[in-house]
Image (cartoon, rainbow, N blue to C red):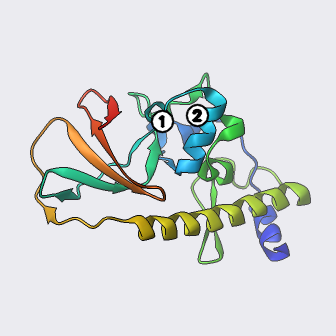
Amino acid sequence: MNALIKKIAATGFRCRRCSKCCRGAFGDNTVTVFPFEIREIIETMGLRWLDIARPHDSDDVDEQGFFHTFEWALRKKENGDCAFLEEGKCAIYGHRPLICRTYPMKLEAGRLELYECDGVGTGAMDGPEAGRMAEALLKRQLVEARETASLLEKYEAFRPARPFSKKDRVYVVHDSEGSRKVLARGDGSCSFI
């Protein structure tokens, strides 16, 4: 853990509060969100599941024309910004997903990796701050492993087919709690079916 803390501190990361990581204009800002994270946002914000998350995009389709995907993504506005970005600030900051808490860092096979971010190399993390980031990164790695294992235990295989050309799509979202069907309409609205 001490080695990880030192590596994190050495990145010189300091969040600049620019919110570029939340804006669609600056690249792919898709945020994977797990069912327990969605439930936490539901409890604290009083929103419904599909107000918070949508199925990840996918081209994997079965013989019935249902698209299959894994896990959920935070919803986005029409301009590609995170749905929870309000006046440059996160409306769910205290309950944001682990991927947001640890950005721009990730542990990959035990190695610290950095995503592109204007805050890298601009400041310094003190020991306690780097320690909190290390704890968050380790928690994220553990949660991702558990969620993946649980998803695989509940996964329902399907026979692949060619996509139907329809404006609306039915997604089967496979996650750690099982499978759910979601109708995603061409106008961006979603509903469980």
Task: Please determine whether, in this image, residue 64 is positioned above or below residue 90.
Answer: below
| Location of residue 139 by image quarter | bottom right
What residue is at 42 percent from the left and 69 percent from the top?
Answer: 152
Residue beneath label 2, please? 42
What residue is at 65 percent from the left and 77 percent from the top?
Answer: 110
Task: Please determine whether, in this image, residue 177 is positioned above or below residue 82.
Answer: below
Q: Residues within 10 Å of mark 2 (few under 14, many from 20)?
A: some
Q: Give the secondary structure at mark 1.
A: helix
Is residue 99 left or right of 23 when viewed as pictured?
A: right
Q: Residue furthest top?
A: 87
Q: Quadrant of the C terminus?
A: top left
| Location of residue 76 by image quarter | top left
- Res 170 visible: yes
Q: Residue furthest right?
A: 127
Residue beneath label 1, please? 49
Residue type marked 2: Ile
Closer to us: 17 or 94:
94
CA–CA distance in space, label 1 to label 2? 7 Å
What residue is at 45 percent from the left and 64 percent from the top?
Answer: 151
Q: Give the secondary structure at mark 2.
A: helix
What residue is at 28 percent from the left and 55 percent from the top?
Answer: 68
- Res 113 visible: no
Q: Quadrant of the N terminus?
A: bottom right
Image coordinates of residue 122 in percent, x first then y, are: 75, 50
Looking at the image, do the residues carrying marks 1 and 2 touch, with CB atoms under 8 Å apart?
Answer: yes
Is residue 83 left or right of 161 when viewed as pictured?
A: right
Image coordinates of residue 17 in percent, x first then y, are: 69, 36
Q: Residues within 10 Å of mark 1 (few under 14, many from 20)?
A: some
Residue type marked 1: Trp
Is residue 25 left or right of 157 when viewed as pictured?
A: right
